[in-house]
Image (tube, rainbow, N blue to C red):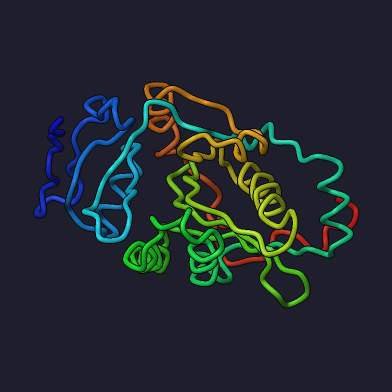
Amino acid sequence: MTIYLPPLDDNDPELFPPVSSALDDPDGLLAIGGDLSPQRLRAAYEHGIFPWFGNEEPYLWWSPSERAVIDPTTFVPSKSLRKFARKQGFRVSINHRFDDVIEQCALIRGAHQVWITHEMREAYKKLHRLGGAHSVEVWQGDTLVGGLYGVGIGGLFCGESMFSLQTNASKTALWRFCEHFKQHGGRLIDCQMMTEHLASLGAQPLPRADFIQRLNQLKHRITDATLFQSQWISGDLNGQ
């Protein structure tokens, strides 16, 4: 069966087809082509769209019929995670080592993360330097042992990937980021597509229409200006 995908306009990086026109099979495939410029990436996330493609594939853009989301205002870490993080002496920072985080996310899962191509990594690094993409880092002593990265859109954070080099390091990154995000006005974390791992972290499914409604409410929400400043967001977790 031949699938027709509308090509993106090379001259208008902010123009995307309506997400309601995304395919049912494969679920959410919306458009092809364009580029990975900061302007296009930003516009994609503001419309509930994200790029996802493998090496030697054309740029593919998606908006699945159901999103996996986490509400940071209700996220509660398990007692075992709190205890483990304190015992390991984890510390957590924001935007200290974005480049290292995205490189580790591409590396840590190997073939399962083939979509974090060199071109994708360079595009998000550029977006980070312009203030649009952000990282959370987990440290054990002076060693980076886990983290996550994504794109901030007002009161919404679009998570892209996470990694762990130590047990529970990525869970600690999510836990501490949820606390930090909600304290500064954040209201929803988009995890894109549901997996068993995300479900175990508390992600819930949200139909595309409901997600777009929340996105439109949150993308203009004013958050604390210090939200994504490079900073430590926890000490060694003692007493937490």
- Of residues 116 and 238, which is closer to you in this image? 116
Furthest residue to the front?
A: 1
Asked if 227 appears above or below 31 in the picture, the reply is below
* Side of 123 relative to 91 (left or right): left
Rendering quarter of residue 23: top left
Badge count:
0
Q: Position of residue 55 (x, y in %)?
A: 31, 60
Residue at 86% of width from left, 41% of height from top?
79
Using the image as rendered, state which of residue 142 and residue 25 is in the foreground: 25
Q: Examine the image and state in which quarter residue 140 appears.
A: bottom right
Q: Quadrant of the N terminus?
A: top left
Residue ranking furthest to the bottom? 142
Q: Residue at x 24, y 52 (%)?
A: 59
State the residue in front, 193 or 109: 109
Horizontally, residue 137 falls left or right of residue 237, namely left
Q: Residue at x 51, y 66 (%)?
A: 107
**Up/down of 68 relative to 175, above or below:** above
Could you tell me which residue is drawn at 86 percent across and 44 percent down? Answer: 80
| Whether residue 68 is situated above or below residue 8 in the rendered picture | above
Query: Residue 106 location in percent, x, y?
Result: 48, 63
Residue 36 image offset from top left, x and y in percent: 26, 58
**Percent position (x, y) of residue 167?**
75, 57
**16 above or below 85?**
above
Q: Is residue 105 left or right of residue 27?
A: right
| Left or right: 176 as drawn, with respect to 155 | right
